[in-house]
C-alpha cells in the first residue's frame, strides 16, 4: 500500500470514528433530555399526571391547573427530537392554534418554553375518541350524527375562513368533550393538536373549488 493510500485510509477511519462518536453523543443527550422530561411533575401552575397520548415529538399529559382546578391536556414537546424543519413545523402549529377561537375546536391556552421542552397547554376533551365511542356503543343515531356533522362542518368552515385547512380529518381528530354510557356527548370538538395537522391554506381558488 502506498503512503497516499495509507493516509487516505487513516483519514477515512478517523472521520468514521468521529461521526460515530458524535452520533453517540447526540443519542446520549436525547436520552438525558427524555429522562429529565419524564421526571417533571409540575410546570408553572400545572400539575402533570398520567400520559394520555404519545406522538413523534413527545407525550400528551393529563394535568390540573392548580389555582382553578381545571383539567387540561399538556403536550410535552421534547426539543432534543427536533431539527430545524420540525421546529418550524411546531412553531407553525402553535401560531395557527393561537388564532383559532371556536366552540368546537380544541383551545390552546398557554405555551411554556423551557431549555429542554415546549409545553402546550390545551383544552382537555374527556370523551375519548369518536371511533372508540362508535365501536363501544354501535352506530350513531341519526339525530346525533347530524349534530356532530354540523359541529364538525362549522369548525372546518371557520378554519377555512381563516385560510387554514385541516389535513388529518379522521375519527381520532374529533374527541367528544364528554360522554355517558347511555348516550354520546352533545358537543363535539375538532382536535388540531397534532404537528402537521394544520397548514396555511392552499390558494384561495382551491379552497372554494
Image: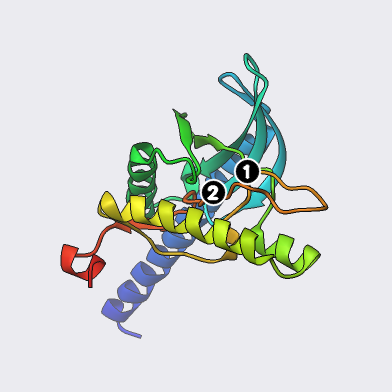
Residue topped by disc 2: 189
Residue 31 in view: no
* Cβ atoms at labels 1 and 2 below 8 Å apart: yes
Q: Which mark is residue 169?
A: none
Residue at the extreme right of the image, as rendered: 181
Compared with 34, 181 (above or below) is below
Residue topped by disc 1: 125
Badge 1 crowding class, 10 Å Cα cut-off, few under 14, some 14 to 19, many 20 or more, is many
Residue at the extreme front of the image, as rendered: 143
**Helix, strand or loop for disc 2:** loop
Nearest to N terminus: mark 1 or mark 2:
1
Task: Return the residue nearer the eye: 84 or 140.
Answer: 140
Residue 174 in view: yes
Indicate left or right for 195 with 7 as reference.
Answer: right
Q: Percent from the top left, x then y, of residue 5? A: 31, 80
In percent of the image, x 64 and y 59: which residue is there? 144
Amino acid at each position: 500500500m502506498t503512503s497516499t493510500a495509507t493516509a487516505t485510509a487513516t483519514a477515512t477511519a478517523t472521520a468514521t470514528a468521529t461521526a460515530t462518536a458524535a452520533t453517540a453523543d447526540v443519542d446520549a443527550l436525547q436520552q438525558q433530555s427524555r429522562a429529565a422530561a419524564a421526571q417533571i411533575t409540575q410546570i408553572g401552575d400545572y400539575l402533570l399526571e398520567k400520559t394520555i397520548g404519545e406522538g413523534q415529538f413527545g407525550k400528551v399529559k393529563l394535568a390540573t391547573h392548580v389555582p382553578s382546578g381545571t383539567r387540561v391536556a399538556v403536550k410535552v414537546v421534547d426539543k432534543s427530537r427536533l431539527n430545524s424543519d420540525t421546529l418550524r413545523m411546531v412553531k407553525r402549529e402553535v401560531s395557527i392554534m393561537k388564532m383559532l377561537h371556536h366552540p368546537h375546536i380544541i383551545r390552546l391556552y398557554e405555551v411554556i418554553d423551557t431549555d429542554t421542552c415546549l409545553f402546550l397547554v390545551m383544552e382537555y376533551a374527556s370523551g375519548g375518541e369518536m371511533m372508540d365511542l362508535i365501536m363501544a356503543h354501535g352506530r350513531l343515531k341519526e339525530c346525533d350524527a347530524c349534530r356532530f356533522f354540523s359541529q364538525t362542518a362549522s369548525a372546518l368552515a371557520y378554519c377555512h375562513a381563516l385560510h387554514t385547512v385541516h389535513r388529518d380529518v379522521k375519527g381520532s381528530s374529533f374527541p367528544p368533550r364528554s360522554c355517558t354510557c347511555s348516550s354520546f356527548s352533545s358537543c363535539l370538538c375538532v382536535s388540531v393538536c397534532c404537528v402537521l395537522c394544520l397548514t396555511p391554506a392552499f390558494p384561495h381558488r382551491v379552497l372554494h373549488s
